[in-house]
């Protein structure tokens, strides 16, 4: 696992946490930002895997 994969997984986890927080508090903005960050992290991780 390289550095970019780790960063991608970290962003994915951080985004998931924001998404859940937004759902629990009813804040659609936080929920949306969390989804975007989660998918961005997933994409970054996948790109890093392909570069190997």
Image: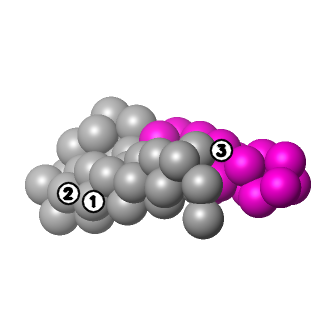
Residue density around tag 2, few if under 14, some if 14–19, many if 20 or more, within 10 Å: some
Work out whether residue 25 or residue 40 is closer to the camera in this orientation and state it: 40
Above-or-below relation of 15 to 24:
above
Above-or-below relation of 4 to 25:
above
Q: Is residue 21 on the magenta stretch?
A: no
Q: Quadrant of the N terminus?
A: bottom right
Q: Nearer the viewer, mark 3 or mark 1?
A: 3
Given the current orientation, which residue lies at the most extreme left position?
Answer: 25
Residue in view at x 49 percent, y 55 percent:
6
Q: Nearer the viewer, mark 2 or mark 1?
A: 1
Residue beneath disc 3: 44
Residue beneath disc 2: 21
Chosen colour scheme: one colour
Q: Position of residue 11 (x, y in %)?
A: 43, 48
CA separation, marks 3 and 2?
23 Å
Q: Nearer the viewer, mark 3 or mark 2?
A: 3
Helix, strand or loop at mark 3: helix
Residue in view at x 58 percent, y 45 percent:
4
Residue beneath disc 1: 17
How many numbered marks appear? Answer: 3
Q: Which residues are magenta?
A: 35-52
CA separation, marks 3 and 1?
18 Å
Q: Position of residue 33 (x, y in %)?
A: 40, 37
**Mark linked to residue 5:** none
Tell me, yes or no, whether the two marked residues, 3 and 1, touch with CB atoms within 8 Å. Answer: no
């Amino acid at each position: 696992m390289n550095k970019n994969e780790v960063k991608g997984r970290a962003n994915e986890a951080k985004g998931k946490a924001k998404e859940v927080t937004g759902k629990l508090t009813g804040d659609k903005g936080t929920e949306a930002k969390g989804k975007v960050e989660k998918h961005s992290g997933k994409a970054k991780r996948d790109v890093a895997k392909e570069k190997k």
